[in-house]
Image: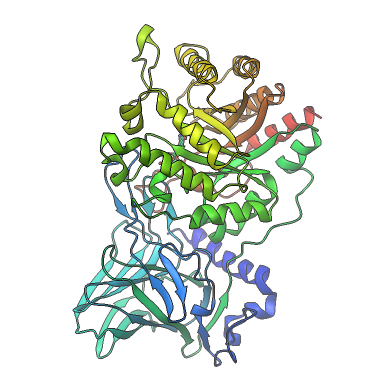
Amino acid sequence: MPNVFRARLALFASVLCLLAGGAAACDPSDGRDARPGASGAGPAPGRVDLLAGDWSHVPGGTVGPGGVRVHGLGRQIVLQDGTGGQPHPPVNLRGPRLMVRGDFQVGATVHRAAGQTASLYLYGEVPIVYDEWLQNRRGLRVSVSERELSLAVWDGGSAAPVEDRTASVTSPATVTVTVERHGGDLVLSAGDTRVSVPDPGVFDAGSVTFGVDAVPGAPDWTLAALEATARDDGGVAVRDTPMAGQSAKPSDSLRALAEATGRRLSIGAAMAAEPLVSDDGYRALAATQFSMLTTENALKPQFVHPMPDTYDFTEGDLLADFAAANHMQVHAHTLVFGEANPPWMRQTALADRERVMTDHVKTVAGHYRGRVAAWDVVNEPLSPDDDGPDGAPGLREHLWQEAMGESYIDKAFTAARAADPEAKLYLNEFGAEADGPRWDALYDLVVRLKERGVPIDGVGFQSHIHEAGDHIDPEVLRSHIADLAELGLSARISEIDVYGESPRVQADQFAGVLGACLSEPACTSFSTWGITDRYGSTAEHDSYPLEPGDELPWDQRLHPKPAVAALRDTLRAAR
Ligand code: XIL
C-alpha cells in the first residue's frame, strides 16, 4: 500500500476521534472507554468492553442477554450473470470502532455448538465492496471449530491472505480466544495453543472494525464477550461509528445551487455503506453536496435477499438513515433486474417465479415504505442487442422475462405500488439517450405499459458514457424527456458517469446532460453513479491496491475535477 494512502487513513482515524468526542477523548492512551453510556461501572483502565456498542445492525446478528447470536447467512457476491461467488462476510459497519495505539489484545468468548465454526474478523481497513466483487484490504480472521483454530491475515496487497495458519485443538463449547499485536507479531491463542505470525501492519491506521460470520445451516454461535486491553505502552478506546448528519451545506454545494434554481430538482449520487462509515472525506462530500442518494448496490437482490427466507436490510437501512440525517431523499435501486440475483433465485422453477418476484417486491418495497422517494422497479428491461422485430432491441432475456414475458414488468410495478403507494415508480434503462432503435423500443414499451394502466411514474436515463465518442447530445436527450412528459411521465438522469475522456470533455458532458434536465420540467433528478474515482464502478479491482477509473466528478484524492465547476456553473445559469 502506498504510504500516502496509509497516511490518509491515519489522518482519518484522528479526525474520526475529533468528530466523535473532542481531542481529549481521542487519545487512546488515556485508557478509558470514552464512549458516552459505556456499560456498568465502566471498564477498568486500559480495558474496553466492545459488546457495549451497537451490534444490532450486523447482518445475521441478534443481540440478546447472552451476547450476540450469530446466524450464518452464507452471503456470496456473484458476478452480474450469477456465476462465480466470493464470500461476503458481514461487517459490523455501524458498530464500535476500536482505536488502538501500540500493542493491544482483543479477547473474544465464543459459545459454539457442535458442527459450527465461529469466525471473528478484525479489520484494519473496511473491505471495498461492489456487487460483483469484494476487495479485502488489511485485516485478519480468527476461526474456531471443534478441532481447529485458524488465523488468516490480509495485508492489502493481494486477494489471498499473506498468512493462513491452522492449529489442531480440542475446543470446548465455550472458549476464549485472544488476538494480540505484540512486538511486531500477531499472536492468536486459545488455551495452550498459540499461533504467531509477523504483523504486516494490519492495524497501522489506528482502528479496528469487527465482523462476525457463521456456517449457514449449522447451529448459531454466540459472541458472549469481546474486550480489548492495552499492553505495555499501548492504548485502546472505543468510538461509535459516525453516522450523524452534517448540518452545514456550503452555499456553492451542488444541492444548494440546485435549490437556488427554484426548481424541484434533486441532485444525487449512488452511494455505498462501507465508504460512508470508513472514509470521512467521502462522507463529507455525500452529506454536503447531494440532496438525494441512490442505493448503489445494497438493495440489489443478491445483497438484500441472500437466501429464500432471509432478507438483510442492514446496509440499505444504513443508507436510508444517513439520508434522513442529512435531509436527503432516497432513490432506491433496484427491485427487478436480470442481473445481480442470488443463485437460489436464478434456480427457481419457472412456475414459481412470479410468486418469488412479487414476494420480493412486496417485502423489500414494504420494508422501505415511507422512507424512499422512488424506486427503480424494473432495471434494464431491454436487450443489449438489436434482436427484436425490425432490428430493434427486444426484451432482455432473463429469469423473470422467461417465466412471464413482458407481463413481468406490469406485475412488478403493480406489486411495488401496493407495497409503497407514495413512492414514485421508475423504469431505468441505458443507452436510450440518443435517437435510434433503442430509444424507439423504450418509448414503445412505456406506451404499452401506459395503455395497460401499469402504475409507472417515470423513466430513468442511466447516461453511462463509457465508450470513446459515445457522447450524449443534450438536445436529443431533452427531446426524449419532452416526449415522456407528453405521456404524463417524469424522467431522470439516473446514473451518469463519463469514462476515458479528457477532463474538459468530461465536464462538458456532465454539464450538457444537466442542462437538458434543467430545461425540462418533467426531469425530477440528476444523479451520478458514484461520487469519487476512489470508489468508482470501473475500477480495476483485480489490482492491489485498487486501480481507480476516471469517470466521476471528484478524483481519487477527493479533489473536484473541472466537471464539478461545470455542474455548478450550469446550476447558477438556471437561477
Ligand atoms: C454496476 C455496479 O456499480 C458495479 O459495482 C457492478 O460491478 C456492475 O453494476 N447500470 C445499473 C447499475 O443499473 O446497477 C450498474 O451497477 C451499472 C449499470
* 489 relative to 163 in the view: left or right: right
Residue 564's place in the image compared with 141, above or below, is above
Q: Can residue 340 be seen in this view?
A: no
Q: Which of 265 and 454 is in front in this view?
A: 454
Which residue occupies the foreground of this view, 33 or 366? 366
Q: Residue furthest top?
A: 390
Residue located 40% across and 64% down the image:
60
Q: Where is the C terminus found, in terms of image quarters? A: top right
Give the side of residue 484 with respect to residue 179, left or right: right
Q: Which residue is drawn at 66% across and 25% down?
A: 517
| Residue 496 percent location from the top left of the image | 55, 32
x%, y% of residue 421?
60, 39
Q: Which of 526 and 418 is in front in this view?
A: 418
Q: Which residue is drawn at 28% across and 80% down?
A: 196
Picture coordinates of residue 427 (x, y %)? 51, 29
Residue 359: image location, x then y, percent: 42, 43
Is 272 left or right of 85, judged from the image as shown? right
- In what quadrant of the picture does the N terminus appear? bottom left
Q: Name the quadrant containing residue 265.
A: top right
